Image (cartoon, rainbow, N blue to C red):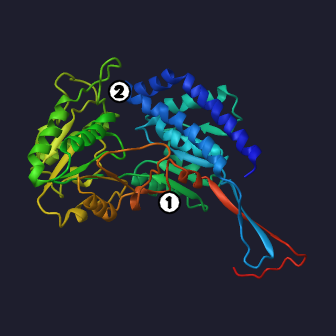
């Protein structure tokens, strides 16, 4: 990879990073108002843009041309990294800037022109980044923002033979549709799709830690997080104690939108989402689940798309709230008294495997279950995400990776350049 190309890309990325830093309040305000995300939580969205531009500007410099040894000594060989071509990114609404950052950094670093199609629910944040690209004088076509409610436009982009990379953060159904529509030509795909994250809380677990992680991830961003815990399997011996800790945290969580208040749970994205979540809760209760907390709007908020942090006990495998990725502030507790079927139940997920959580003080047990669980990320006794850590699923939860150096491979192609050392130039053919 030519060093002058790398230096030019780095220069533009650092210019954009500096504008993102200078416009922190404006960018976070965009996320706050178009999504209803609590103000403190908008910092993560903004911070990931800064982190992505920094990380990939540095990481691309490590992708050097690589020499290969010729066994016969008759040729020299180089492996060269080049941009894959135009990249098309479809973004989910739940993290308007974070999701954009996961595509922007590696695409710019690799040298791929990027077309961003933000969710029609949250286009403002993406356009704000576009405005900053224009402000720094980024050459036209390097980053393009195209917001539309039209599925025909999205399908036309996907079906075009121009994009060489199609990347998505969204649902399994959307991922399947894009791959079918994009089959007009051979393309690369990088997709982070849905999941139905299991949590295994064993008898020897640190229950306060487990309750903090489950409720912390589940109730922030109103539970609208791809890696959010959905099915919480709890050992019968600690069921009562753990349930109380989760319920106490659910009841203590502050719900609202006030920028100056310590809000943990904001509104869900829209009325349709609220109605779907309420239906999942009501149906589960009708089928025998116990409503332990929440279940409706908070009593002090009689309007808006607010759903009180909800805890359901005695959830069973046949219930929709168990089978589906809820994408809302609902904790489903499933007790177990034997471990024989635990792996089978945890892996039984049509949406595929993105993230799983394990809580136990027995490290050998943790490693055993980590090996057996079919999920792309296994979080043991805690949770950690960052721009340098690979993020991706297994099976129906997607292909490729966001974050880490692995993401760059989705936007780069490898070319082999071989040169004969003698005048004949013949080294045999084996294709």
Can the viewer see residue 119?
Answer: no
The quadrant of the image that shows the C terminus is bottom right
Can the viewer see residue 47?
Answer: yes
- 10 Å neighbourhood of mark 1: few (<14), some, or many (≥20)? few
Could you say whether the residue bearing mark 1 is in a helix, strand or loop? helix
Q: Which mark identifies residue 180?
A: 1
Residue at 50% across / 42% down in the picture?
Answer: 150
Residue 221, above or below 90: above
Could you say whether the residue bearing mark 2 is in a helix, strand or loop? loop
Residue at 58% across / 47% down in the picture?
Answer: 88
Closer to the eye: label 1 or 2: 2
Residue at 66% across / 28% down in the picture?
Answer: 134
State how many labels appear: 2
Residue 141, above or below 198: above
Instruction: Write down the residue under mark 2.
Output: 38
Residue 110: where, in percent of width, then height?
Answer: 65, 48
- 10 Å neighbourhood of mark 2: few (<14), some, or many (≥20)? many
């Amino acid at each position: 990879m030519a060093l002058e190309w790398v230096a030019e890309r780095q220069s533009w990325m650092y210019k954009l990073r500096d504008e993102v830093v200078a416009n922190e309040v404006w960018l976070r305000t965009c996320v706050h108002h178009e999504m209803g995300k609590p103000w403190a939580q908008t910092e993560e969205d903004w911070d990931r843009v800064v982190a992505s531009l920094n990380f990939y500007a540095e990481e691309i410099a490590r992708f050097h041309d690589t020499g290969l040894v010729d066994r016969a000594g008759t040729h020299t060989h180089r492996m060269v990294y080049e941009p894959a071509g135009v990249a098309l990114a479809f973004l989910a609404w739940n993290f308007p800037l974070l999701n954009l950052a996961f595509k922007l950094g590696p695409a710019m670093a690799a040298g791929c022109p990027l077309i961003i199609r933000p969710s029609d629910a949250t286009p403002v944040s993406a356009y704000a980044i576009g405005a900053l690209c224009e402000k720094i004088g980024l050459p036209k076509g390097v980053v393009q923002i195209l917001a539309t409610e039209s599925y025909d436009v999205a399908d036309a982009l996907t079906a075009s033979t121009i994009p060489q990379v199609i990347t998505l953060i969204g649902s399994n159904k959307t991922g399947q549709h894009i791959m079918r529509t994009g089959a007009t030509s051979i393309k690369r795909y990088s997709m982070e799709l849905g999941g139905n994250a299991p949590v295994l809380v064993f008898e020897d677990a640190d229950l306060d830690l487990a309750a903090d992680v489950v409720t912390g991830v589940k109730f922030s961003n109103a539970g609208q997080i791809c890696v959010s815990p959905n099915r919480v399997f709890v050992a019968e011996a600690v069921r009562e104690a753990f349930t109380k800790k989760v319920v106490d945290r659910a009841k203590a969580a502050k719900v609202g939108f006030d920028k100056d208040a310590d809000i943990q749970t904001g509104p869900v994205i829209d009325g349709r989402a609220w109605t779907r979540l309420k239906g999942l809760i009501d149906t589960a209760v009708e089928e025998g689940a116990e409503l332990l907390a929440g279940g409706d709007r908070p009593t002090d908020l009689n309007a808006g798309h607010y759903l009180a942090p909800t805890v359901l006990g005695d959830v069973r495998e046949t219930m929709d709230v168990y089978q589906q990725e809820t994408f809302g502030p609902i904790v489903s507790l499933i007790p177990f008294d034997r471990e024989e079927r635990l792996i089978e139940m945890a892996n039984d997920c049509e949406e595929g495997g993105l993230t799983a959580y394990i809580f136990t003080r027995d490290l050998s047990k943790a490693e055993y279950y980590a090996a057996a669980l079919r999920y792309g990320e296994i979080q043991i006794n805690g949770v950690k995400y960052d721009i340098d850590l690979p993020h991706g699923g297994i099976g129906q939860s997607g292909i490729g990776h966001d974050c880490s150096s692995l993401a760059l491979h989705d936007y780069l192609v490898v070319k082999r350049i071989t040169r004969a050392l003698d005048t004949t130039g013949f080294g045999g053919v084996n294709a």
